[in-house]
Image: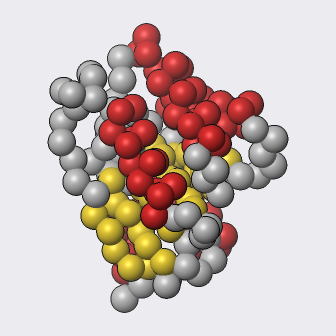
Amino acid sequence: MSAATARPHRLEAHTWRGGVLIDDTAAATPEEVRSSLRVLAEVGRGRRTIAVIGELDVAPSDQLDAHDALGRIVVRLDVSQLVVVGDGARHLHAAAGLEGSWDGESVLMSSPQTAYDFVRATSGEEAVMLITGGARCDLRSLVGRLREDSL
């Protein structure tokens, strides 16, 4: 799917722990997630940035290349922390590690619950967090729990 034919989606921004939580769980394609990562880099300039990304909705033959490219983009955009959710997105985590000399900046979580526990324990205050790529892993529950924390 090209950027011109990508299905429209909407970013929703929420205040969270003195920072910003960007909900883009509707993003499913590499183009949509790439666009959202650019927003994260721009909004988060000068602050700690966290990208939580689930498995993309791509053809099996494109799975490795699509996740690989996004892992590398995360590093190039200087995202502080990458949290990859689900075994199907494992290559995204591996690619981020190969692209840079990261040591713990990319973690692989088995579920939205383990991602929640990790983000709550490590995010700090005033961070800018993007949650995206929820096509094959329901990340809406993660957004809901994080939003409840900030009330």
Q: How is the model colour-coded? A: secondary structure
Residue 9 in the figure: left or right of residue 47: left
The residue depicted at 76 percent of the width and 52 percent of the height is 104
Q: Quadrant of residue 3?
A: top left
Q: Position of residue 76 (x, y in %)?
A: 62, 41
Which one is in front, 63 or 114? 63
Which one is in front, 1 or 120? 1
Tell me if I can see residue 117 in this picture: no
Q: Position of residue 147 (x, y in %)?
A: 37, 76
Residue 61 in the figure: left or right of residue 108: left
Residue 114 in the figure: left or right of residue 58: right
In the displayed structure, would residue 147 be above or below residue 134? below
The residue depicted at 47 percent of the width and 58 percent of the height is 42
The residue depicted at 42 percent of the width and 39 percent of the height is 34
Q: Position of residue 100 (x, y in %)?
A: 75, 38
The residue depicted at 81 percent of the width and 49 percent of the height is 103
So how many labels did they put on this image? Answer: 0
Image quarter hosting the C terminus: bottom left
Tell me if I can see residue 150 in this picture: yes
In the displayed structure, would residue 142 be above or below residue 121? above
Q: Position of residue 106 (x, y in %)?
A: 67, 48
Farthest top residue in view: 61
Image quarter hosting the N terminus: top left
